[in-house]
Amino acid sequence: MEKSKKILVVDDDIDVINIVQTILENEGYQVITANGKNEAVEKAKVENPDLAICDVMMSTHFEGFELAEIFTSANEFKNMSVLIQTSINVFASPDEDAMRFARNYRSEMSDNDLDVLLVENLKSGKAGIDYRNEDGKIIWLPVDGFIRKPVSAKKLIEAINKVL
């Protein structure tokens, strides 16, 4: 029998963690939880999860993005997929290069219109976050997809099945 996949759920809202944990455990996943970036990094180092589901806004507006950046750039987490759980609208990109779509879209808007663009090409599965950090720099952060808040059990499992 295949060992069940481990999923790290990171959110500062205990109710969200409890809901997501219940859904995932009912599907046979091992669930590890964390309430913030530092705890999540420490648990990921010890537990070596297959997937991290990260909330965006925790102690800061960008904490989830910062965490996703650590997970996607650090060599020790290279085998871990990252999904972002958010209530921010996700743009469906007609361009298979999600970053190119985000940058073109941003260039057509005035500079101050959008601090965050979440973009996903549904055909290729390529997704990412194009955001302006606290220093005003535009950063592209590739991720494996998005989960819409409030959480739908069906859509949560579909998103996980797509990346695992």
Image (cartoon, grey):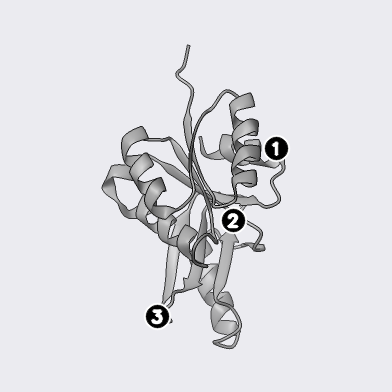
* Label 3 CA crowd tier, 10 Å (few <14, some 14–19, many 20+): few
Q: Which kind of residue does numbered mark 3 sit on?
A: Asp
Q: Position of residue 100 (x, y in %)?
A: 50, 69
Mark 3 or mark 2: name the one nearer the start of the chain.
2
Q: Is residue 60 left or right of residue 92?
A: left
The residue drawn where x is 36% and y is 47% is 41
22 or 108, nearer to the observer: 22
The residue drawn where x is 72% and y is 43% is 152
Which is in the foreground here, disc 3 or disc 2?
A: 3
Q: Which mark is residue 121?
A: 2
Q: Residue furthest front?
A: 14
What residue did someone put label 3 on? 135
Mark 3 or mark 1: name the one nearer the start of the chain.
3
The residue drawn where x is 57% and y is 23% is 28
Residue 97 visible in the picture: no
Which is in the foreground here, disc 1 or disc 2?
A: 1
Q: Which mark is residue 153?
A: 1
Q: Position of residue 94 (x, y in %)?
A: 63, 62
Q: Residue furthest top?
A: 1
Q: Which kind of residue does numbered mark 1 sit on?
A: Ala
Q: Position of residue 106 (x, y in %)?
A: 55, 78
Distance between mark 1 and mark 2 Cα atoms:
22 Å
Q: Is residue 34 left or right of residue 160?
A: left
Q: Quadrant of residue 27?
A: top right
31 or 90, nearer to the observer: 31
Q: Which kind of residue does numbered mark 2 sit on?
A: Asn
Q: Quadrant of residue 142?
A: bottom left
